[in-house]
Amino acid sequence: MPQRLVARRLLRGLLGGLNLLAAAGVAALLIPRPAISQTAKSKAPAKSYTAPRTPDGQPDMQGVWSNAVLTPLERPADLKGKEFFTQEEAAAYIKRTIEQGNKDRRDGSGTEADVARAYNDFWWDRGTSVVKTLRTSLITDPPDGRVPALTPAALKRAAQVREARLLHPADGPEDRPLAERCLVLNSAGPPMSPSAYNNNYQVVQTAKTFVVLNEMIHDARVIPLDGSPHIPSGIRLWMGDSRGHWEGDTLVVDTTNFTGQTPFRGSGENLHLTERFTRMDAETLLYQYTVDDPESFTRPWSVAIPSVRTSGPILEYACNEGNYGMEGLLSAARFEEKKKSK
Amino acid sequence: MRTRVAVLIGIAGLLMAAAPAWAHHAFAAEFDAQKPVKLKGTVAKVELINPHSWIHMDVKDADGKVTRWMVEGGSPNALFRRGVTKDALPQGTEISVDGYQAKDGSNRANGRDITFADGRKLFVGGSNPDEQPGK
């Protein structure tokens, strides 16, 4: 990958400079890229646990898993510098988060914020716990637990999207986000993210494929394990092109060929996503990913989400069949236009 | 008023960026914060569908005229997983809705707060309304 070469060259330059200034041990702590692989390695499964095997001899990850969790992707500002909760702090955080997120609250009644809460709490399913490690962010790297700064090019791209939406908010369905059109939903990924509901996914394995069926919307991601190369770079897909391979007991999924129309926290079409699935114990499937997109982020970043075994089945979402909301949005926009022209 | 819609959508976008705990679409672009409605009536039909459920209800005014309203809720999947089905709200059940009317003035509202007519919470005890606490 050309991006990797560039990154390595930059890294070598940085290393050389730092070695002149600092002891090698100190320098090692300051270099971003090795820190990622260290993070990933430190999350490798405990040696004492060996995953059961499928008939094909692969580590068996089949079943339904939930990634509902209250731990935020990014470490909140008020927890700056605090990498892990104590048990007591975690309990207080859980209580506070559930109370603050409760949609039955009606403070601010008559405001847009209250409309945006949309509906009662019984519809929602955000989870009731934080990650077992008690880490205060799902981001494991960089160490500050925050998404790295966007590059000027990524900021410009995001501004252009916002501007286009301001000029044409709802002329037709094509002006609305892909999620509202029931085409793809962000939390289904890749990468998969905990959301406010439908945080379940099912894994089905064969000798040559690894299938991830996410309850949020309708896509079953069928990931070839046969060593075949990515599709040509001229072919672009909303969910990218995923290829998997085994590294020991970890399934590594490499995804490229994005369109840029499904930005993840500001990523672009040349996002190179690496996901890792590892069985930790009978009830836990560790899901990790690294976002590598030098065109969009000032450095790569990594996330770890332990998924918990849950009862199935995955339920149908059938978003497009019941999307009366789209009609309502467009109708509201026509009404507003008429009002304005009078 | 396109500017206003645009601004609201912009705000919604910001909120989306800040909080992933978001409905599938921008409710603030569909319903009007300036048009709060309080409806009391009976359940006519329940559509537990995705991406959002809709409860149809008949609301009688002081003159006895009945108007059909559609009330938008959330994805039913979490309810199904807890064992709740549409039998929890049989036709004729009296409910109250505190929500916001559609911007286009049609008889649609978001079900910001849906309860039984006597204020009890919906879907707490399972599918049978008789099992609801307090009854």
Image (cartoon, rainbow, N blue to C red):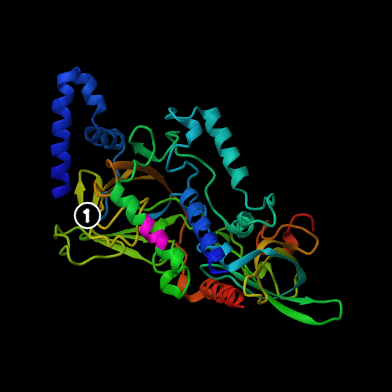
Give residue A93's position: percent from left, percent from top. 55, 35
Residue ID at (73%, 60%): B131
The image quadrant where one finds the N terminus of chain B is bottom right
Q: Does the magenta stretch include residue A162?
A: yes
The image quadrant where one finds the C terminus of chain B is bottom right
> Is residue A71 positioned above or below B17 on the image?
above
In the displayed image of the protein, which residue is found farthest to the right? B63
* Number of other residues with Cα within 10 Å of mark 1, as a class: few under 14, some 14 to 19, many 20 or more: many
> Which secondary structure class fits the magenta region best?
helix
**For residue A305, what is the image quadrant?**
top left
Residue ID at (47%, 70%): A319
> Is residue A198 positioned above or below A97 on the image?
below
In the displayed image of the protein, which residue is found farthest to the bottom? B65
The residue beneath circle 1 is: A244
Residue nearest the viewer, comparing B135 with A128: A128
Tell me which segment is drawn in magenta.
Answer: A159-163
- Relative placement, left or right, of A130 versus A206 is right
> Is residue A327 positioned above or below A56 on the image?
below
Give residue A24's position: percent from left, percent from top. 18, 20
Can residue B6 be seen from the camera position used here? yes
- Relative placement, left or right, of A311 versus A98 is left
Q: Does the magenta stretch include residue A53?
A: no
- Relative placement, left or right, of A152 versus A27 is right
Residue nearest the viewer, comparing A190 with A260: A260
**For residue A63, what is the image quadrant?**
bottom left
Give residue A145's position: percent from left, percent from top. 39, 36
Residue ID at (44%, 28%): A82
> Is residue A48 positioned above or below A172 on the image?
above
Q: What element carries label 1?
A: strand
